[in-house]
Each structure stands twice: as structure tokens, then as C-alpha cells.
Amino acid sequence: MSKKSTKTADFHIRMTPEERANIDEVAEKCGLTRSQLIRLLAQLPTGEIRGSNVRLVFVDRKEVTRIHREMRRFGTNLNQATHSLNSISYYLRNGKLRYEYLDAALPEIREKLDAVNLRQRELCEEMSRLETAMFAS
């Protein structure tokens, strides 16, 4: 026996060719059909939107993959930096590293750590802006 469709309400709208092309472009970039995009918009919780300054964020698989990759890069860089600093500390304690070498290497180490810290701050700022957003997936 076939399952009856729950999609029985029709929706018709007139728009300019440019508006339709825009909807088609947005749907394509989101990996959705035009109908799926409109249904997604229809599912927004109106109670949370009325009278507030809500920003809707659509997170597709491509964007989630990009965020995940960036966070893994940050984690990998931080892990490498921590490992390096622990190695330096170990070799200094055991007399296997000369202070002159460390003095020469410190500026480069600081520069790399500063770059990691800067990217961490940027990621935190990006994530903070998303905290108050409403997500659609």
C-alpha cells in the first residue's frame, strides 16, 4: 500500500524573473530544490522571529566541513606548539639544548604562536557571532 502525501496545500506566488533566478541560485548553492528551500523557510519558528533581531544561518554540509577542517587545523597547530615547547623544556632541563640556540629560535617560535593565537581569536569571534543565530540545516 502506498503512503499518502502530507503535502496537500498549494502555494503560488508571482515574482520577477530576477527574483526566481535568485531563488534558484540560493537553492542550488544550498544543495536544495526550489521547493525544499521554500519548505525550509516555511519551517522557521515565527514565535522566535517576531519582534526580535534574529539572524538566520543556513549551515550546509560544505560549511560544516569547512568549520570542522579549520578547527582541526587550529587544534593540530596548538598541539604541535605544545609538543615543541615541552620538548624544549625537556632538553633544557637535561642539558641537551644550548641556551644560545633557544635565544636564536625564540623569535620564530613567538611568531608562530602569535599566528596560532590570532587565528584562535578570529575563530572565537566568528563562533560568538553565531551564538545568537537561528540555524537551519
Image (cartoon, rainbow, N blue to C red):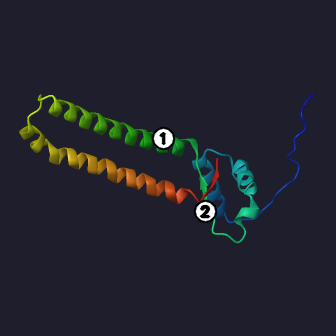
Q: Whole-percent x and y of residue 26?
A: 60, 54
Q: Whole-percent x and y of residue 101?
A: 9, 38
Give the mark, 1 or 2, whose residue is nearer the N terminus: 2
Q: Nearer the viewer, residue 43 or 71?
A: 71
Crowding at dot 1, Cα within 10 Å, few <14 / some 14-19 / many 20+, comes out as few
Instruction: Please give the name of the residue rendered at 59% of the width and 55% of the height, measured from the top-left corner.
Output: 57
Q: Nearer the viewer, residue 103 or 20?
A: 103
Left or right: 116, with 109 as reference point: right
Instruction: Please give the name of the residue rendered at 75% of the width and 54% of the height, measured from the top-left corner.
Output: 43
Furthest residue toward bottom: 51
Give the residue number, with chain letter if any, for mark 1: 68
Q: Amino acid at mark 2?
A: Arg
State the count of labels.
Answer: 2
Crowding at dot 2, Cα within 10 Å, few <14 / some 14-19 / many 20+, comes out as few
Q: Amino acid at mark 1?
A: His
Q: Could you give the CA–CA distance between mark 1 and mark 2, rounded to whole angstroms?
A: 22 Å
- Which quadrant would residue 17 be assigned to in this image? bottom right
Q: Whole-percent x and y of residue 12?
A: 81, 59
Give the residue number, with chain letter if any, for mark 2: 55
Q: Nearer the viewer, residue 39 or 102?
A: 102
Furthest residue toward front: 93
Q: Secondary structure at mark 1?
A: helix
Q: Is residue 91 above or below residue 35?
A: above
Instruction: Please give the name of the residue rendered at 11% of the width and 29% of the height, measured from the top-left corner.
Output: 95
Left or right: 15, with 61 as reference point: right
Q: Secondary structure at mark 2?
A: loop
Instruction: Please give the name of the residue rendered at 33% of the width and 39% of the height, measured from the top-left corner.
Output: 77
Q: Nearer the viewer, residue 77 or 85?
A: 85
